[in-house]
């Protein structure tokens, strides 16, 4: 640049090297200009990076704020009362109850479902002198949805259900909207055993969870606290409190579904009920295997009663 | 006469902290991704609440956990493994435009993916997975580190004053269009 370049005729400047040739001074100026330009570009790049970072963080913040705002708004508007389930179709329940004991006994020997885990050394779980079975689950839970079909099929061999509801698991969970029954509001009568089910939560979303249904009784709470963990559940994982949880007389524990709920995928209530009676279908094979294993265990608790049911299992095991 | 400007690696005072921070973040993300993947494959429940709003099980087993048959956890492992390479001291010293752009693109892609996943968790699943959230935080921090690091280490060339006269500054061996003059 002219401003920094000595012109012809000027006195030599101070310094050991004397006056710089015009070309060198010019190069210094060009270098300084280029340096300034490059520093400006680098500042701009840094600014872009910072702005991009802020934008990403802002988007995250906006997503969270919108979620919190919509949650509080919807929770105010949402009903806190769970709508009642329609009663399960009587013909479907009859179909489950009418599956021959021999069929269940044969299915119990298959590998289509995991067997309840046997435990020993625990005090018998009874009520009024009868063996007791405790079930803890929730309507949103897809594993519970699968397990209920087997439980209802099995226990229908020992007594009668009334008031069973028809529902589905959560629409946003694993195996969404799996068709199933609900024990909420139901009752069970049997001269062989006592069945104490509880559905803790509905399938109605609320504040990140689900609207509650029935609280655990002190006994149910004690059982799930004591036995719904390794080694009683037969799993090596350190997790505890999983549902469904079934305590069969303190002799067998079920924690989680006995079979994969995916076999019920895409089926409505009537279709599952129909498939449950058909051992050649994947759903029927799994439901009957799980039900057969429960019946087999319960027969040991009831000392082989009723013989019309347990006799088939004795014959199957001896055969 | 003067040589053309030569691209010079950024100062270790910049690249070493960037590399240490980047590798640390990538290792954290990789570790969590592997843990989630192993638990998923072994069908072992994650050590995480499975009821209420925080529900890792529900998130990691949701229909969003696989995209076109590919588990997102596998994508996460791939992402952090690649990022581990891109955050190495060698990569931060590299003047290759390809390396720098690839690293920036990967980090940006990761941040965009995280935004989508946060939206899915909050608005589709209505549940939050603690492990996934830690991966999200790591990915966003990697994006910020990579973005600012890329700008701060933008390439420059060593140029002596008398070299500035050279007309070949734009024809250097550098992969970059512009040469930055060192102070």
Image (spheres, coloured by chain):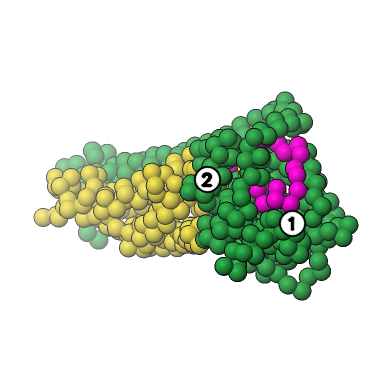
Magenta extent:
A153-173
Tell me the residue at 44%/61% (across/down). B23
Q: Which residue is the extreme one toward the top?
A: A77
Chain drawn green, letter? A
Q: Which residue is mark 1?
A: A306
Pick the front one: A202 or B131: A202
Badge 2 marks a residue whose secondary structure is loop
Around disc 1, counting alpha carbons within 10 Å, would you say few (fewer than 14), some (14 to 19), or many (20 or more)?
Answer: some
Q: CA distance from mark 2 to mark 1?
A: 24 Å
Q: Are marks 2 and 1 on the same chain?
A: yes
Residue B151 image offset from top left, x and y in percent: 38, 47
Residue annotated with mark 2: A278
Instruction: Tell me where residue A138 appears, x and y as whole percent.
Output: 69, 45
Q: Residue at x 18, y 45 (%)?
A: B170
Q: Residue furthest bottom?
A: A121
Residue A68 locus on image (x, y percent) = 66, 35
Query: The chain coloured yellow carries which letter?
Result: B
Task: Report whether B40 appears left or right of B164.
Answer: right
A257 drawn magenta: no
């Amino acid at each position: 640049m002219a401003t920094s370049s000595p012109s012809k005729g000027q006195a030599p400047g101070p310094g050991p090297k004397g006056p710089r040739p015009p070309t060198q001074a010019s190069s210094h100026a060009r270098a300084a200009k280029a340096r300034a330009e490059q520093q400006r570009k680098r500042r701009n790049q840094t600014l872009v990076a910072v702005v991009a970072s802020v934008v990403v963080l802002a988007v995250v913040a906006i997503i969270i704020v919108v979620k919190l705002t919509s949650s509080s708004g919807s929770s105010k508007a949402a009903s806190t009362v769970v709508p009642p389930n329609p009663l399960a179709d009587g013909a479907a329940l009859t179909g489950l109850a009418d599956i021959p004991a021999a069929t269940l006994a044969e299915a119990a020997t298959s590998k289509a479902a995991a067997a309840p885990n046997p435990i020993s050394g625990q005090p018998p779980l009874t009520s009024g002198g009868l063996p007791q079975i405790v079930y803890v689950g929730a309507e949103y839970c897809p594993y519970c949805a699968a397990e209920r079909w087997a439980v209802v099929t099995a226990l229908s061999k020992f007594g009668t259900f009334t008031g069973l509801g028809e529902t589905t698991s959560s629409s946003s969970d694993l195996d969404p909207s799996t068709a199933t029954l609900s024990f909420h509001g139901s009752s069970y009568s049997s001269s062989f055993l006592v069945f104490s089910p509880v559905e803790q939560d509905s399938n109605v979303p609320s504040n990140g969870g689900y609207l509650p249904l029935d609280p655990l009784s002190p006994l149910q709470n004690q059982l799930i606290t004591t036995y719904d963990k390794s080694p009683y559940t037969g799993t090596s994982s350190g997790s505890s409190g999983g549902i469904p949880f079934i305590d069969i007389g303190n002799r067998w524990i079920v924690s989680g579904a006995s079979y994969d709920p995916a076999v019920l995928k895409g089926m409505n209530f009537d279709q599952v009920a129909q498939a449950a009676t058909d051992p050649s279908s994947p759903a029927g094979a799994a439901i009957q295997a799980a039900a057969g294993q429960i019946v087999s265990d319960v027969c040991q608790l009831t000392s082989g009663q009723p013989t019309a049911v347990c006799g088939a299992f004795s014959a199957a095991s001896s055969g | 006469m003067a040589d053309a400007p030569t691209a010079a690696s950024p100062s270790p005072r910049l690249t070493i902290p960037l590399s240490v921070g980047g590798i640390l973040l990538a290792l954290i993300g990789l570790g969590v991704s592997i843990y989630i993947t192993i638990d998923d494959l072994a069908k072992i429940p994650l050590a995480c609440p499975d009821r209420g709003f925080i529900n890792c099980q529900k998130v990691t087993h949701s229909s969003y956990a696989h995209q076109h048959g590919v588990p997102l956890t596998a994508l996460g492992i791939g992402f952090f493994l690649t990022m581990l390479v891109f955050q190495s001291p060698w990569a931060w010293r590299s003047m290759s435009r390809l390396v720098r752009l690839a690293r920036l693109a990967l980090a940006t892609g990761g941040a965009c993916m995280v935004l989508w996943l946060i939206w899915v968790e909050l608005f589709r699943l209505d549940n939050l997975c603690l492990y996934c959230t830690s991966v999200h935080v790591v990915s966003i921090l990697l994006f910020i580190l990579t973005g600012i690091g890329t700008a701060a280490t933008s390439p420059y060339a060593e140029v002596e004053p008398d070299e500035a006269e050279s007309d070949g500054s734009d024809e250097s061996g550098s992969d970059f269009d512009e040469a930055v003059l060192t102070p």
